[in-house]
Amino acid sequence: MLPALVEIAVAYHRQPLAYRHLRDGHTPLPHDFAALIPPFCVALTRRAQTRTARLAAISVAELQTAACRFLRDVLLAPGGDHYRCLGLTPAARPADIRAHYALLIRLCHPDHPDRLPAADDHMTARLNEAYQQLRQPASRAAYDATRPAGRDALSLATYCAPWKRRAPGSWRRSRGRRSRRAWIVLLLALICSALLALQHAPTPLRPRPGHAPPAATPPP
């Protein structure tokens, strides 16, 4: 059976715009997201990659690329906290922190045989930094005290689903609103142009008081 997170990683790799919400590092992971990490990492070991690729109906090279892209863009997304780097939430137990770090680091560390080919040193550094901060109760407590209050987490089904498309007919309403805005902008531009033209129009000369205007010269 194909692990759910492998399936999501492949879908994100092939349709990144449909899953663009996964790249938001400020969106907290669902509470039950952590359970998806162990089978995901096990399925990406060198011994299991061929079977995983066959279940996903893709090549091993594409599987490796999709998995690495998911790790880089989703778990290690810019703006994400240390818990997100390890695929965890702030309620994680110390044992979960150790286990997830051990699973993820072997996919990124250059000296491990299970390392994904596209993994880089930055990914390893992010995982090491997160683990060093969360592994000890004192440093974890200090880190938690500085974390800003996050948004409410979505359900796992909502978070892992493609971005919702607009309702049928909404594009027509949106197009109508854009058309009205365009007409309003055009009308305001015409009004401003007319006011500027009036302001800079030449003022006709008026005769001084007591002076008659010069008589027209008769034609020869």
Image: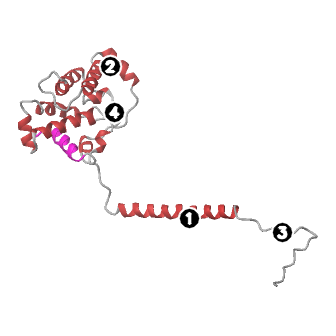
Could you tell me residue 97's position as x and y percent?
Answer: 23, 23
Residue highlighted by disc 3: 206
Residue highlighted by disc 1: 187
Magenta residues, start to end: 2-15
Marks 3/4: CA–CA distance: 71 Å
Marks 1/4: CA–CA distance: 43 Å
> Principal SS element in the magenta part?
helix
In this view, the residue in front, 170 or 47, is 47
Could you tell me residue 205's position as x and y percent?
Answer: 81, 68
The circle drawn on residue 31 is none
Q: Earlier in the sequence, mark 1 or mark 3?
A: 1
Circles 1 and 3: CB atoms closer than 8 Å = no
Q: Amino acid at mark 3?
A: Arg
Left/right placement of residue 134 relative to residue 40 reads: right
Q: Amino acid at mark 2?
A: Arg
Q: Quadrant of the N terminus?
A: top left
Q: Amino acid at mark 4?
A: Pro
